[in-house]
Amino acid sequence: MPCVDDKLGLHNVDEFVFNEVEPKMSLPKSNKEVIAVGAFPGEFQHIFNLEWYGYDYPSFVERYKKEDWDIAVVGACTNDEMRFKYRPRKQVFCYHPPIYVENLEYYSEVHEIKMDLREVYYKIKKNSVGSSVGEKDCFFSSMNNKYWTF
C-alpha cells in the first residue's frame, strides 16, 4: 500500500491506483467576442473568444463602455460597494448583483440561521433524499428540494 514515512519519503509508488476519465460532454465553440472581469465559470473561456481583465475593473469598464464586444461577463468580487453606472445595450452575464442593484439584501440577512450547520449535515447524511434540510424560513430552507442538488 502506498504510504509516506515521517521524513516524507514515498513508499510503494507502483501500487497507486488511478482512472483516466474521458469527458463525454463537449462544449460548443462560438466566434463571439467576450470581455470578462472577476471570478466566473471557467467554461466561458472554452466556448468564447474571451479577453479576461483579471480583477482590473477600471480597464474593464473602459472597454465595457466602448461596446465593441458581443458579450460581457461581470464576475464575482469581494467589493459589494462597487457600482457600474453605465448599462450597455448588449448582453451581460453578471455574477455580482451589487454592481447594478443598490441596497441588495442577502438571503442570510433576511432569514435567521435558526439551525446549527452540523444538524443540517446530519439531516443530509441520515434522512432520505427529499427530506427537509432546514426549518421553515430558516437560512438553510433555501436548500430544501426534492433532489438535494448543490
Image (tube, rainbow, N blue to C red):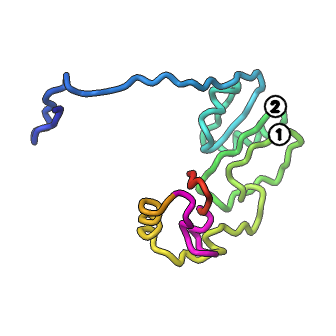
The answer to whether the residues at label 2 and label 1 have Cβ atoms under 8 Å apart is: yes
Left or right, residue 98 beside residue 9 = right
Residue 21 part of the magenta segment: no
Residue 68 percent coordinates (x, y): 83, 31
Tell me the quarter of the image containing the N terminus: top left
What is the span of residues highlighted in magenta in the rendered image? 129-143
Left or right placement of residue 133 versus residue 118 in this view: right
Q: Secondary structure at mark 2?
A: loop
Mark 2, other Cα within 10 Å: few <14 / some 14–19 / many ≥20: few
Q: Name the residue rendered at 55%, 64% in the picture.
A: 131
Using the rendered view, name the quadrant where residue 14 is placed. Answer: top left
Vertical side of 97 occupied by 41: above or below:
above
Q: Label 1 belongs to which residue?
A: 91
In the image, is residue 109 above or below residue 101?
A: below
**Along the horizontal axis of the image, is 7 left or right of 30?**
left
Furthest residue in direction left, as rendered: 6
Label number found at residue 70: 2
List the single residue furthest toward the right: 89
Q: Amino acid at mark 1?
A: Gln
Residue at left offset 49%, top offset 22%: 22
At x 70% / y 24%, what residue is drawn? 28
Amino acid type, residue under disc 2 in the picture:
Asp
Q: CA distance from mark 2 to mark 1?
A: 7 Å
Q: Magenta: predominant secondary structure element?
A: loop
Q: Secondary structure at mark 1?
A: strand
Q: Position of residue 149 (x, y in %)?
A: 57, 51
